[in-house]
Image: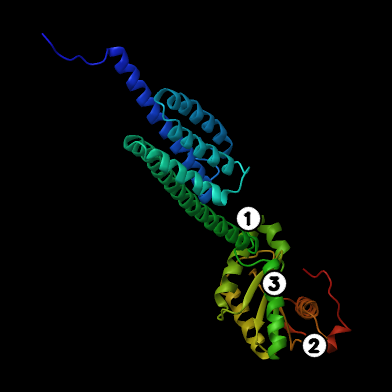
Amino acid sequence: MSGTTGPPRGARLRRRFWIALDYATAVVCGVVVFASFFHATVGSQSLLGVLSPRDAPLAAVLAIALAVPVAIRRRVPVRALVIVLAACVATLAVGGEINRGPFLPMALVLFLVASTCRRGVALAGLGAALTLLIVQGVHSGVLQVNYLMGHANLLSKEKELKATNQELERQSTLDPLTGIPNRRFFAHAFEAEWKRALRKNEPLSLLMIDVDYFKRVNDAHGHPYGDECLVRIAKALRQELQRGVDVIARYGGEEFIVLLPDTDLEGAGTVAAGLQGAIAELNIVNRASPLGHQLTVSIGIADCYPSTSLTCGELIARADRALYRAKRRGRNRICWHSEEDVASESPQNVR
């Protein structure tokens, strides 16, 4: 019986091995060439965190190790060696040994031309390169999404930090006991209003308010009661002021100060009378006060038209002198600053 028999099994295995090695050569060279091209054109320093420019020589050595046996065994040295040449050129270009401009495209062309000698090999090489680029694109997309999410999170944290800083800044300008602005806030507001009044030639008035016999309140009723009195007084003063531009602040201890922009002496007197009446309506008990055992306040008023020859401190000193005059004259009253009384009176401890 006649017939034909195929090659021995060992020969078939060897043939498949060399074919697989042939394809592996194309894949490795494709990865090297396209990865090098990607590094040079996109500017990435690493490919998926695995293949970087400094790894390219190692990949080229692997390509040579695969290509040389294929070239010798399959007797296609031209195609295999051209593929190796393309990988080496790409390696040198990425490493900076030669100019990237002309040599990287040359390496790409050499690889494509050499791969077309066998359609299957060409498809394998191109498939490896295409897969590499797709994976790299997905990786870049993931990185971009992570960057955008991180950037959004950073903006959110920055917004929260800004809000926290603003709240801290606001709290630093408030009196912790009464909740009204403190002396620091008043200093900034007073300076700003002073400049505005100077520019517009408008009057500016100050009210200096002091709680009468407050030390006796603490002695007779205790400090918690004294603190409660200050809180109620601050609330009543703030509610009595009608304009949003008016500024009230706790100036220190039992003293309060009120800034009245665009207000002359007559208008300041009207406001002072209203504030004193609001405190009287609270009917706060002070058993140690000789003034009907009620908590009362004294108010000193000063006004001016700001000028370059006058300072903010001088206007405060005028209001302070007027307040001491009210204290000296029996408390629970309102006094205005007048130049005639400055030489005859000086502040003393008349609390």
Mark 1–mark 3 Cα distance, whole angstroms, equals 31 Å
Q: Mark 3 is on which residue type?
A: His
Q: Which residue is mark 3?
A: 188
Q: Which residue is mark 1?
A: 224
Determine whether 50 is above or below 159 in the image.
above
Q: Mark 2 is on which residue type?
A: Ser
Determine whether 220 is above or below 266 in the image.
above
Q: Which residue is mark 2?
A: 338
Mark 1–mark 2 Cα distance, whole angstroms, equals 38 Å
Which of labels 1 and 3 is toward the front? 3
Q: Quadrant of residue 288?
A: bottom right
Q: Residues within 10 Å of mark 2 (few under 14, many from 20)?
A: few
Query: Residue at (43%, 26%) from the top-left corner?
Result: 70
Judged left or right of residue 66, residue 11 is left
Judged left or right of residue 113, residue 343 is right
- Inspect this view and state whether residue 308 appears: yes
Which quadrant is the C terminus positioned in? bottom right
